[in-house]
Image: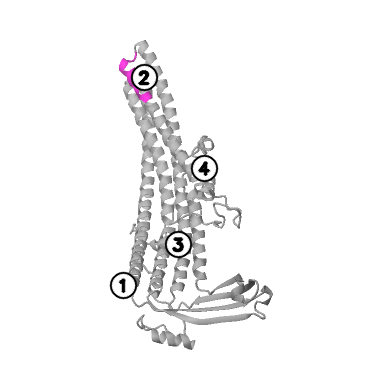
Amino acid sequence: MPICSRSNPKSSNIIIAAALAGTLTSCVVGPDYRALGLPMPSHWGDKGATEPRKVPQLSQWWKQLKDPTLNALIEEAIADNLDVATAKAKIRQARATYREQKGALLPTVEGTGSATRTRTSAAESGTADATFSTLYAGGFDASWEMDLFGGNKRAAEAAKYGVDAADEQLRDTMLTLIGDVASYYVQAREYQALRDLARRTAISQRKSAALTHAEYQAGSATAVDTAKADAQASSTESDIPAYEISYAEAVHRLSVLLGKPPATLEERLKAGGPIPSPKMNVAIGIPADILTSRPDVRLAERQLAQYTAKIGQAEANRYPSISLTGDITSSAASIGDLAKTSSIGWSLGPSLTVPLFQGGQLKAAADVAKAERDQYFIAYQSAVLSAMEDVENAVVSLTQERLKYVKLASSSSSYRRASDLSRTLNKAGATGFLDVLDAERSLYSAEESVIESRASIATDYVALNKALGGGWDGLVDVSIPAVIDADTGPHPSTAK
């Protein structure tokens, strides 16, 4: 008869009778995990949109920036990053744990053997001299826990969810890594552009200062003009070391993300390059898409499943357990007689363990498991809300930054015309040199803002794809360990 009923854990009489009758069928206790249907809004924040959003195209999104150097850096980072290597090791650990838990569902068999040399004194043997005899014994021991209430099955189920969670952890690590590589690469190009702008502007301002000094000697300029011209050129030159510092920090961080020493990429990136510029809008789909596209959300869901299974594992400990044990032994005076003319003995039978009194520990352990499951349920909800927040923020940032860039570009163009016009008027004597310096300072500031806004657009583009769950979708080999052990069989110890 089946024993999966709503009986009290202490109702062991029925269990014993059923076990002896050989009619037991195992079951599981605890809640069965079912995917939760969280309420999700039908669209993102722009309520004006009436048409369904297109499905996001997240596969290798960074290649849409059309920057071969960035593409190569990301591939190298996926191959050599240390956080990725750690995540791979966790997958190997989770898979090994799953195999270990599955093994608990199977019987265990052990072989035994012994040889005993016995000396019998002359007095004991009744002979003139002491006698010697040798007894050889061999056998097998076997045991199998019947797992009536599915404690081992729940442990294996939790371990399987743990493998899924480790897989998602790797995907989340790679998503974060790709976003970081792209962001620091944008920063490196941004600081190169700002440094180059400062150098060009400083050279121009030094030429203006030299011209002002010449005019001062000729009596057509004042000491105030020369002092301000020198001050402005020096101020611009002081920006160059600051940008060099920020550029070096971005390059060093990139190198470390690739699993290399900090200075590795300096030579490779020093030639410069344009700031990556996304040319197209990003389809963002609907909020429900993040449940399947965001690895951190999928990770939280798998962890919830894992800890739901652990409730059943804890509950099973409150019920009786039955194990079948048996052994076969053979003993003889010579090895060749074992299992032939030797004596053979065997035993076989079930053993029952009933938890009668544990001071409430077993129920408390089940309550602990339920509380842990609740925490992971809340963490799953939190992960979904955080993912939605990330997308909403990234959409707003990218949209508004593009509008800002248009205005900044227009402002820079106007300041350039004003700078050219002020020089012309100054040469004609229609305006003072201070107006020229003011126009040049405004132009420099405007061009800085244009570069920073262009970099912000690229950074917001990276953030949006990261928020949507875009990452590495290629195969990743997790089978190769970080440390290859040699000579792991029996060998002389070298430990001191």
Query: First in sequence: mark 3 or mark 1?
Result: 3
Query: First in sequence: mark 3 or mark 2?
Result: 3
CA distance separating discs 1 and 4: 55 Å
Name which residue type carries label 2: Ala
Cβ–Cβ below 8 Å for labels 3 and 4? no
Mark 4 Cα shell of 10 Å, populated few (<14), some (14-19), many (≥20):
some
CA distance separating discs 3 and 2: 74 Å
Residue hosting label 2:
428
Mark 3 Cα shell of 10 Å, populated few (<14), some (14-19), many (≥20):
many
User: What x and y, as percent, mark residue 319?
Assistant: 39, 78
Residue, x 34% and y 31% (percent of image)?
442
Q: Is residue 469 visible?
A: yes
Query: First in sequence: mark 3 or mark 4?
Result: 3
Name which residue type carries label 3: Ala
Q: Nearer the viewer, mark 4 or mark 2?
A: 4
Cβ–Cβ below 8 Å for labels 4 and 2? no
Cβ–Cβ below 8 Å for labels 1 and 4? no
Query: First in sequence: mark 4 or mark 2?
Result: 4
Q: Nearer the viewer, mark 1 or mark 2?
A: 1
Q: What SS does tag 3 mark? A: helix
Q: What SS does tag 2 mark? A: loop
Cβ–Cβ below 8 Å for labels 3 and 2? no
Query: First in sequence: mark 1 or mark 4?
Result: 4
Name which residue type carries label 4: Lys
Residue 446, quarter of picture:
top left
Residue hosting label 4:
260
Answer left or right for 32 relative to 127. left
- Identify which residue, 104 or 419, lies in the foreground: 104
Mark 2 Cα shell of 10 Å, populated few (<14), some (14-19), many (≥20):
few
CA distance separating discs 3 and 1: 35 Å
Residue hosting label 3:
165
